[in-house]
Image (tube, rainbow, N blue to C red):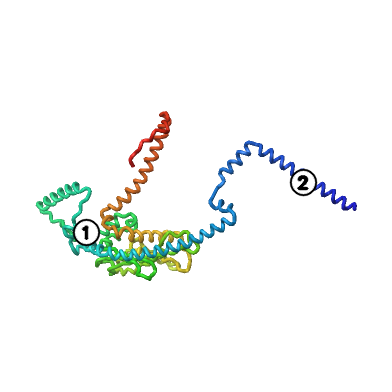
């Protein structure tokens, strides 16, 4: 009995001690919460706490989360339907490519000089027609004077000289790939075509570069095929935004002896360790060239990831291929004249200019607010034509 009594007393003392400690903590907490600086710090932390969508989702009841999961299942099904949509778009591209091709064939004949446009085909009224007419008259006058002076320069060359080469020079994305020793070769380029994969075949497109006979290689056509995929990623289906290029294949260029611009020959001296004699050896190393475009980096099929430099090179390659397909080939004459490039530049400058103008207006409004009395809110604001 005595032992039970002592145990009960000890337990009672423990409870009282804990209660006293708890009371002290509560009093301390009350004192802290009454401190204005502590309250301000706590409020600041609450204001700056990140309120992310995921943190909000975590607070939802289990039944609501279950319904959200069902919505995600529906979204995955939508992505697969979208993938089928793009497959049909690819079929439409193939269909309309056949309609464009006769026009592109005629374009090629005009460029290389196989045929001349009729008067009706060559009739074109530009916005600056008067200025061009005046420039043409002056040019004709100069030509006449040169002829009278005995000039023999040809004034009517065959076709449109250096048509595709000029496009390469005009487009920054392409000119960055072209080296000085590539230029004479590109002047033999007669045409670029886009061919789409056949029905039932995996989605892809092929770029065909047609060259006239030249002193550099024996190929008449160089090809580059881009393989595409139009299906959501199993591990991340919500990232699907349409077909993407996943791989590409080039072709073998049959270079004539001593004409391969994708390699360069270097000389290297070697010293014999024992005899101390020195010999000179020659070896070939890779060389920067546009024609490396036809020997692309191969995407590994075993799932191994590429290094950062290779991934960057491949991404640029895909971008160039897409640009040929979507912009260069369909609108070649506008990239030759520079009009397509000017349109792109003007659009970008217009956006920037608008932003600067808005900033100026905002600054002006602030200055007016300081220097002028406030207008009645009921008065209409001035309208500016955009």
Residues 166 and 90: in front is 90
Which residue occupies 88% across, 53% down?
A: 3
Closer-to-camera residue (273/298): 298
Element type where label 1 sits in the image:
loop
**Residue 328 at x, y = what percent?**
31, 58
- Please name the residue that numbered disc 2 is placed on: 18
**Tag 2's secondary structure?**
helix
What distance separates the C-alpha of mark 1 from that of mark 2? Answer: 98 Å
Residue 71 horizontal/vertical position (percent):
51, 58
Query: On the image, which quarter does residue 226 sit in?
Result: bottom left
Compare marks 1 and 2 and give the one earlier in the sequence: 2
Judging by the rendered image, the residue that carries numbered circle 1 is 160
Q: In the image, residue 270 lies at what x, y percent?
A: 41, 65
Rate crowding at label 2 as few (under 14), some (14 to 19) or many (20 or more) other CA atoms within 10 Å: few
Q: Residue 170 in the image: x percent, y percent? A: 29, 54
| Residue at (56, 44) in percent of width and height | 48
Q: As drawn, is 13 to the left or to the right of 377?
A: right
Which image quadrant is residue 352 in? top left
The reply, left or right, for residue 335 in relation to residue 317 is left
Instruction: Give the numbered dot on residue 73.
Output: none
Q: Of tags 1 and 2, which is closer to the observer? A: 2
- Relative placement, left or right, of 198 versus 303 is left
In this picture, is 131 found above or below 105? above
């Amino acid at each position: 009995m005595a032992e039970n009594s002592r145990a009960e007393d000890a337990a009672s003392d423990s409870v009282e001690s804990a209660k006293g400690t708890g009371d002290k903590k509560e009093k301390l907490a009350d004192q802290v919460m009454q401190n204005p600086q502590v309250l301000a710090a706590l409020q600041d932390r609450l204001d700056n706490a990140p309120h992310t969508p995921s943190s909000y989702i975590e607070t939802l009841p289990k039944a609501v989360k279950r319904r959200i999961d069902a919505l995600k299942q529906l979204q995955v099904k939508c992505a697969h339907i979208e993938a089928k949509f793009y497959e049909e778009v690819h079929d439409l591209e193939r269909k309309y490519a056949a309609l464009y091709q006769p026009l592109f064939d005629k374009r090629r004949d005009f460029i290389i000089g196989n045929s001349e446009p009729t008067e009706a085909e060559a009739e074109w009224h530009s916005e600056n027609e008067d200025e061009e007419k005046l420039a043409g008259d002056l040019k004709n006058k100069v030509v006449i004077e040169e002829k009278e002076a005995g000039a023999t320069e040809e004034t009517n060359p065959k076709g449109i000289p250096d048509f595709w080469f000029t496009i390469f020079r005009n487009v920054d994305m392409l000119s960055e790939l072209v080296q000085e020793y590539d230029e004479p070769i590109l002047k033999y380029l007669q045409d670029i075509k886009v061919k789409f994969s056949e029905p039932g075949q995996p989605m892809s497109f092929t770029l065909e570069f047609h060259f006239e006979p030249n002193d550099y290689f024996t190929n008449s056509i160089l090809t580059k095929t881009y393989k595409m995929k139009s299906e959501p990623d199993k591990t991340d289906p919500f990232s699907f935004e349409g077909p993407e290029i996943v791989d590409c294949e080039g072709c073998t260029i049959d270079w004539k002896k001593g004409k391969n611009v994708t390699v360069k020959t270097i000389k290297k001296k070697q010293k014999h360790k024992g005899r101390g004699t020195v010999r000179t050896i020659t070896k070939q190393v890779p060389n920067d060239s546009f024609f490396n475009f036809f020997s692309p980096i191969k995407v590994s099929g075993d799932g191994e990831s590429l290094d950062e430099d290779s991934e960057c090179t491949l991404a640029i390659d895909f971008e160039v291929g897409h640009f040929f397909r979507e912009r260069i080939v369909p609108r070649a004459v506008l990239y030759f004249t520079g009009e397509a490039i000017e349109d792109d530049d003007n659009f970008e400058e217009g956006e920037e200019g608008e932003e600067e103008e808005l900033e100026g207006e905002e600054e002006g409004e602030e200055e007016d607010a300081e220097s002028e009395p406030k207008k009645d809110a009921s008065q209409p604001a001035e309208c500016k034509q955009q």
